[in-house]
Amino acid sequence: MPVESSPTYVIGVDFGTLSGRAVVVRVADGAELGSAVHEYPHAVLTDALPDGTRLGPDWALQVPADYIEVLQRAVPAAIEAAGIEPGQVIGLGTDFTACTMVPTLADGTPLNEVAGFENRPHAYVKLWRHHAAQPHADRINKLAAKRAEAWLPRYGGLISSEWEFAKGLQVLEEDPEVYATMGRFVEAADWIVWRLTGSYVRNACTAGYKGIRQDGQYPSSDFLAELNPGFAGFVTDKLDQPIGQLGDAAGTLSAEAAAWTGLNEGIVIAVGNVDAHVTSAAAQGLDPGQLVAIMGTSSCHVINGAELKEVPGMCGVVDGGIVAGLWGYEAGQSGVGDIFAHVVPPTYTHERLTELAAAQRPGQHGLIVLDWHSGNRSVLVDHELSGLVVGETLATKPEDVYRAVIEATAFGTRVIVETFTAAGVPVNEFIVAGGLMKNPLVMQIYTDVLKLPLSTIGSDQGPALGSAIHAAAAAGAYPDVRSAAAVMGRKQEAVYEPDPAAGAVYDEMYAEYKRLHDYFGRGENTVMRKLKALQRRVVLS
Amino acid sequence: MPVESSPTYVIGVDFGTLSGRAVVVRVADGAELGSAVHEYPHAVLTDALPDGTRLGPDWALQVPADYIEVLQRAVPAAIEAAGIEPGQVIGLGTDFTACTMVPTLADGTPLNEVAGFENRPHAYVKLWRHHAAQPHADRINKLAAKRAEAWLPRYGGLISSEWEFAKGLQVLEEDPEVYATMGRFVEAADWIVWRLTGSYVRNACTAGYKGIRQDGQYPSSDFLAELNPGFAGFVTDKLDQPIGQLGDAAGTLSAEAAAWTGLNEGIVIAVGNVDAHVTSAAAQGLDPGQLVAIMGTSSCHVINGAELKEVPGMCGVVDGGIVAGLWGYEAGQSGVGDIFAHVVPPTYTHERLTELAAAQRPGQHGLIVLDWHSGNRSVLVDHELSGLVVGETLATKPEDVYRAVIEATAFGTRVIVETFTAAGVPVNEFIVAGGLMKNPLVMQIYTDVLKLPLSTIGSDQGPALGSAIHAAAAAGAYPDVRSAAAVMGRKQEAVYEPDPAAGAVYDEMYAEYKRLHDYFGRGENTVMRKLKALQRRVVLS
């Protein structure tokens, strides 16, 4: 059928933890015309490999062929759903969970696809939430602190067990043969782009946040050798690669990938990126002072600043880590929606508890919660912390606890906002993306606690829209990501406004929260750490 | 039918919160031959009088005629169930909830039975859990502290709103006409004996614990006048009465009461007593060093000592308050079984949670709870305190919380035991009575935490058996209560023995409990108090 020649489209593909989603977006105005989701056939491997080989505790692997299936299935399905011709698509952008690492041969072939390595756990993708490298992370942190490595403060003083160096060191020490065979250790965000284009460009975002690349340098081979002599060449031999800036073109679609997707060979493929970071573009939150909060089971906070500041407890600060030309800051809360879910008793639902809790006034339930059920990422960076509830009586009802838990996560966010502001990275606007923006009670509590108007992203597919915006910039339809985002992004401003009377009560409660936060979180009373240690000792004895 | 002339019996009648229970007991060996329960027709009046007159918040009244019905129904039914002849009964003893107060004319007629007073709330019995006199108790405490009244330390520094003076002051100030008409303000424990015998003897137990009678004196009229000039004569005009020692005869059964009960006129009626205190005799726990814990929805601890000591946070110490010749000490935990019940989620049961929790090892759940959901009676004496749970993660299960709550109440008991010991009232044996002795998990946790063997009372009807023992002593079948208890009481010794390995883990957890206990309970962090104040302000605004 004949189509108008003028409208052009870009495709954003968001690779999540369990599935990939492709969205077709109109370049001229950002309209989302069609989308499709494909679930990874192997999901997450936590107990065993596909052949039955057992995995240890805290392992989380994936199968890279599943990602290719998303390109083969979801992209054509999205094009069909949008009712456009593949020839109208001028570019494709991707975002991925991070830090998710693919061990490959020098040509990008995943090691688990190499004959003889199918039954080797370390030959598979280590998903972001593979946590079995904690001992390795501990050693990295201890040594970095001892040596006062200059890069350590850029990460709030702590390198995560989820990141590249901890995962790489675990491979070396637990399966030296896999390590030796591994030509490259690649962020999945870059691996998928490599598969699409045929060339390997490392994105500035994950290289900075997850790969400890600062001021153009990685940790020194001297440092790495002190961790383990065999690790000295990790950067040179496994990691280092030319850097691509976010929103630039990484290359063009290869013939092979064109066949997978049904798109034309040669269209522009954007440099890889991370889900939270592309969402900033989709939410028009790229200016300094705009904090974008992606709120779901956990929350991620991204904000740009014109200058480099060291913010206590942030996850990291990276030059061009969110958008080229600005310093990108990231912070996070380890548990948000999943703590809400944890306090829903049998026979109750989120909807019912929200309705009951919404009928209350601030302070009515008499509770304060510390929202550390999954530990505290920002600003305390301590996963040995745990949850606390104070104020329970025999009259306390499930909706009381539910509301108190929502408030606690809002207080936790306020600590982050105040810490950024105090460190010289002011927060003037709070923009929400993610599933929790659908809950008006959660949103009203956040605006009241933060005393900031809340804007919300105008899309249910924020990351995929953000990736499409990056594709449009990479394809040259706009001069840069920021101007593409201005047209194609969608934000509803000040959807929720703070109620000063509620805010006054929350100020009182926040003062109590903050006192408990500092008492239990900053070493005065280490009962949470002691209880976890006791628990481990008892379970293992 | 012919009966052997030798066996004789006594009857114990236990007046509880909702019903009265009569038990027929063989004098020779304490065997319980038959029992019967009668529920109070009016139960507890909390919302309105029988005629519909509304009551305020925190009111709790009873109707004295309901108590007489217990004598008329339960006593004959117990005799019938036991298969004995009424003529074989040589005495009857009673115990009552306390402090439960009956306003009467000078002849003992309850005011609510006086024409014109049927619709006056203050003319009815104020049940022990009538809590509407808190403002009056606050004034009594403030003034007593200011004047450094010598009796105040005998009550751990605090007079309860449940006790005689607070309730009396409320009557005076809220219904002066009832107060003026009231010839006597009588403990129900003594009123029922007055009804049985025709003469009013005040028992040493409630006079001491609830009536602030110490060293033969009540609070001075000077003190009372400073509370309210109209209250100056409260002791002389309403309270004072000859004291009867526990286990003595108060008198003999009147013709009228003989007709109610079917018993012979002239048999001995023991001095009135309180449920927890008579249980000490039934559990053979009258010697110094033996602590009897009556464990149910809340817990009460009674222990004798040879000397007078001032124990911080005890409910009171009274000369002859448990048994004549020794100082009786009382302490308590406001919430025990009712906190267990509070943490049972829908679709779970106590039985299921007990089974799951029993499969755990100490320390495995990673939690510490402060068991203050109903405030803290001993040793902090602060009902503005509230519950706390620390250590929660997304993996925390209902059985974890259930076990942690049981442990918390055991830690609370250990604080009481250690406080008594430190004050010079050593605890050498821990004897359990009450419903919770049926739960082996609770018992094992207590013995492990306390590091004391646990004995248990050998009767399900401890208070009624205790009252029967007092009747046997009063009737002269034994020289005193202690020798009667030695024969008629029943205790199983060291049913539960501490496991040293568990005890070592509990020592670690108790150290954490104690630190939180002191931090939140002794004024360093007053968040619990602030949250309750905020809650009241918000609800009332």
Image (cartoon, coloured by chain):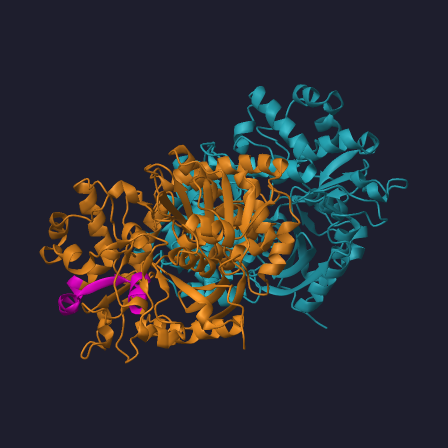
Chain colours: A cyan, B orange
x, y percent for residue B400:
58, 50
Identify whether A309 is placed above or below B250: above
Q: Nearer the viewer, residue B507 or A32?
A: B507
Residue A234 magenta = no
Q: Residue at x 25, y 57 (%)?
A: B164
Left or right of residue A459, residue A128 in this image: right
Q: Residue at x 46, y 52 (%)?
A: B484
Q: Nearer the viewer, residue B246 or B145?
A: B246
From the image, which quarter does the N terminus of chain B lie in? bottom right
Identify whether B148 is placed above or below A17: above
Residue B175 magenta = yes
Q: Residue at x 16, y 62 (%)?
A: B172
Highlighted magenta segment, given as a residue range:
B172-195
Q: Nearer the viewer, residue A192 or A535?
A: A535
Quadrant in the rendering for residue B154: top left
x, y percent for residue B134:
26, 56
Q: Residue at x 48, y 47 (%)?
A: B409
Quadrant in the rendering for residue B473: bottom left
Left or right of residue B235, residue B207 in this image: right
From the image, which quarter does the C terminus of chain B lie in? bottom left
Q: Is residue A242 visible?
A: no
x, y percent for residue A412:
45, 46
Q: Nearer the viewer, residue A333 or B349?
A: B349
Q: Residue furthest right?
A: A115
x, y percent for residue A394:
43, 58
Q: Is residue A178 visible?
A: yes
